[in-house]
Amino acid sequence: MLSDVRVGDVVQMRKLHPCGSDQWRVYRIGADIGIECLKCERRVLLPRRQFEKAVKKWLHKAPSDSALPT
């Protein structure tokens, strides 16, 4: 599951953010996964393992690099 995560993916998290939203966009991939709340634009870094446990489902997958025209 985690190997498929890409920058631009939109995920639904299990817990609500204090602003009331549960939808986040992935903005960074590395040792930690960076996500941004779609409602209040707050950015959070989560360790990969914590991100994997917190994701409820993928709402939108970003296009893969191979699908983009050159």
Image: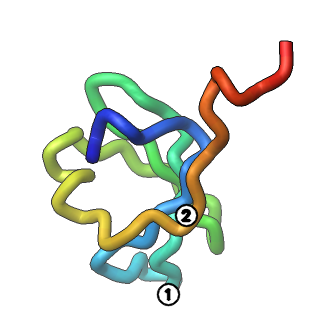
- The residue that disc 1 covers is 20
Q: Nearer the viewer, residue 66 or 44?
A: 66
Residue 13 in the image, given as x and y percentages of width and height: 36, 71
Left or right of residue 3, residue 9 in this image: right
**As drawn, 35 above or below 27:** below
Q: Which residue is mark 2?
A: 37
Query: Which residue is painted at 51% across and 46% down in the image?
Result: 26
Disc marking residue 3: none
Secondary structure category for the residue under label 2: strand
Crowd band around label 1 with a 10 angstrom C-alpha radius: few (<14), some (14–19), many (20+): few
Q: For the residue marked with disc 2, what is the amino acid?
A: Cys
Other residues around mark 2 within 10 Å, as few (<14) / some (14–19) / many (≥20): many
Q: Nearer the viewer, residue 13 or 6?
A: 6
Q: Quadrant of the C terminus?
A: top right
Q: Please state the horizontal and vertical placement of residue 56, each as a whole percent of the image.
A: 31, 72
Residue at x 84% of width, y 21% of height: 69
Which element is circle 1 on? loop
